Image (cartoon, rainbow, N blue to C red):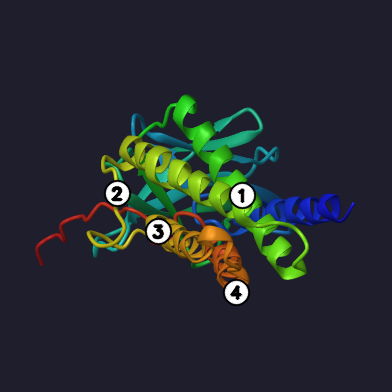
Amino acid sequence: MRKALLWTLAVLITLGTGVFQRLTGPTYPLKGRADVSGRKVSYRLDRSAENSRDHEVKVVVSDASVTGAMVWKRSKVDEPWVRVEMTRLGGALVGMLPKQPTGGRLDYRVLLTKDNNETSLTGEAPVVIRFKGSVPAAVLIPHILVMFLAMLFSNMAGLAALGGKVKTRKLVLWTLALLFLGGFVLGPLVQKFSFGVLWAGAPIGFDLTDNKTLIAFLLWAAAAIMGRKGRRARGWILAAAALTLVVYLIPHSLLGSEYKYLQPPR
């Protein structure tokens, strides 16, 4: 009964972490509502796109008297904003952002006009969208599942170590194995398809997703080593589980791979 309760708690913590990632990650669509001349307009603006084609930006606005435009420029480049008028297609306004190199980012804002009053849906803050390559589902889905299983076993190992009555050795080894498979086998494949490199973390880069995976793996490797031959490693397991939870709470793709544009001559 106690073991079943711990597994239930581990599942709930893991699911909560997944929800938090989806709500805070910089690649998930930005959602909100804006007041456009007294009318509330809901929007869902993408922050990730495939670089095989131009990206469609679509805002549902049933009021035919509302017109729209977009302004965009390359992120972190000192250049003028480009203005693109949006086209009305039925009950929506649609505009296109030009595709970018792998890892390229654009800043963009959507402007809606009614009664000669122009409103930016996101105010002065632009939406940042990053372009990446397409990842086959056969690689992406197993990667996601394995990484969440690693988080599940990590949480269970931590809870078991905290209670002190459930054996932790197999849980530690499962966590370590899943982190290796998800983070160092499937993860680099996802990175290769998305951004053209297998690894962008330490010591060759600053990709936060790669680096936090490395930190979690090293912590669990230390816990596994300290628990050899039946030795108690309760403190190491608790530390590894707690720090793994912290690194998983860091938004996915934060400080991710980025294409470096050349600055235009002055």
- Judged from the image, the secondary structure of the residue bearing numbered disc 4 is helix
Q: Are marks 2 and 4 in contact (CB under 8 Å)?
A: no
Q: Amino acid at mark 3?
A: Leu
State the quadrant of the C terminus: bottom left
In whole angstroms, how far apart are the C-alphas of marks 2 and 3?
Answer: 11 Å
Q: Which residue is mark 4?
A: 235
State the CA–CA distance, disc 4 to disc 1: 16 Å
> Picture coordinates of residue 14 (x, y %)?
68, 53
Marked residue nearer the N-terminal end (2 or 3)? 2
Is label 1 in contact with label 3 (beta carbons under 8 Å)?
no
Q: Secondary structure at mark 3?
A: helix
Q: CA distance from mark 2 to mark 1?
A: 29 Å
- Label whose residue precedes the other's in the sequence (2 or 4): 2
Identify the mark at residue 199; answer none if there is no mark: 2
Residue found at x 49% / y 45%: 177
Name the residue that disc number 3 marks.
214
Neighbours of disc 4 within 10 Å: few (<14), some (14-19), many (20+): some
Q: Position of residue 73 (x, y in %)?
A: 32, 54
